[in-house]
């Protein structure tokens, strides 16, 4: 009976361990930010490319 109780307490303590949960939460948040960034850049990619092309054209026209 004592061995069974010890086993129960050991298994229960393994599931109550909270070490490392913060790291996993931060990793999930970073993953979501990366996914949002990739989605945003792929959605706005053509507009950003056109903006940089316009800036390059203006700078080349202003150069002596």
Image (cartoon, rainbow, N blue to C red):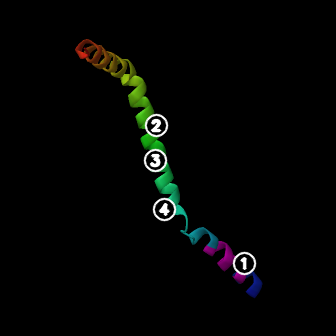
| Tag in front: 4 or 1 | 4
**Residue 7 image label:** 1
Give the mark nearest the N terminus, 3 or 2: 3
Distance between the alpha carbons at the discs numbered 4 and 1? 28 Å
53 vs 22: above or below: above
Question: Could you tell which of marks 3 and 4 lies nearer the N-terminus?
Answer: 4
- Depth check: give the residue in front, 35 or 3: 35
Q: Disc 3 and disc 4: Cα gap in Å?
A: 12 Å
Q: Secondary structure at mark 4?
A: helix
Residue 12 sits inside the magenta stretch: yes
Residue 50 picture location, percent across and down: 33, 16
Instruction: Decide: is 11 above or below 24.
Output: below
Judged left or right of residue 53, residue 13 is right
Residue 10 position in % (x across, y down): 68, 77
Q: Residue at x 42, y 30 (%)?
A: 39
Q: Name the spot of residue 8 as percent of width and height, x first.
A: 68, 77
Q: CA distance from mark 1 to mark 3?
A: 37 Å
Residue on which the image places disc 2 = 35
* Range of magenta residues: 6-13
Which residue is under mark 3? Answer: 30
Q: Secondary structure at mark 3?
A: helix
Mostly what secondary structure, the magenta segment?
A: helix
Is the residue 40 above or below the residue 13 in the image? above
Looking at the rendering, in which quadrant would you find the N terminus? Answer: bottom right
Pick out the residue farthest to the front: 64
The quadrant the C terminus occupies is top left
- Look at the image and tell me whether residue 55 can be seen: yes
Mark 2 residue crowding within 10 angstroms, few (<14) / some (14–19) / many (20+): few
Mark closest to the chain's N terminus, 2 or 1? 1
The answer to if 46 sits in the magenta stretch is no
Up the image or down, 49 lies above or below 13; here it is: above
Give the Cα distance between marks 2 and 4: 20 Å
């Amino acid at each position: 009976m004592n061995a069974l109780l010890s086993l129960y307490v050991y298994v229960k303590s393994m599931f109550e361990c909270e070490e490392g949960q913060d790291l996993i939460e931060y990793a999930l948040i970073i993953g979501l930010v990366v996914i949002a960034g990739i989605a945003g850049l792929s959605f706005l990619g053509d507009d950003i490319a056109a903006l940089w092309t316009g800036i390059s054209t203006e700078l080349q026209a202003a150069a002596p």
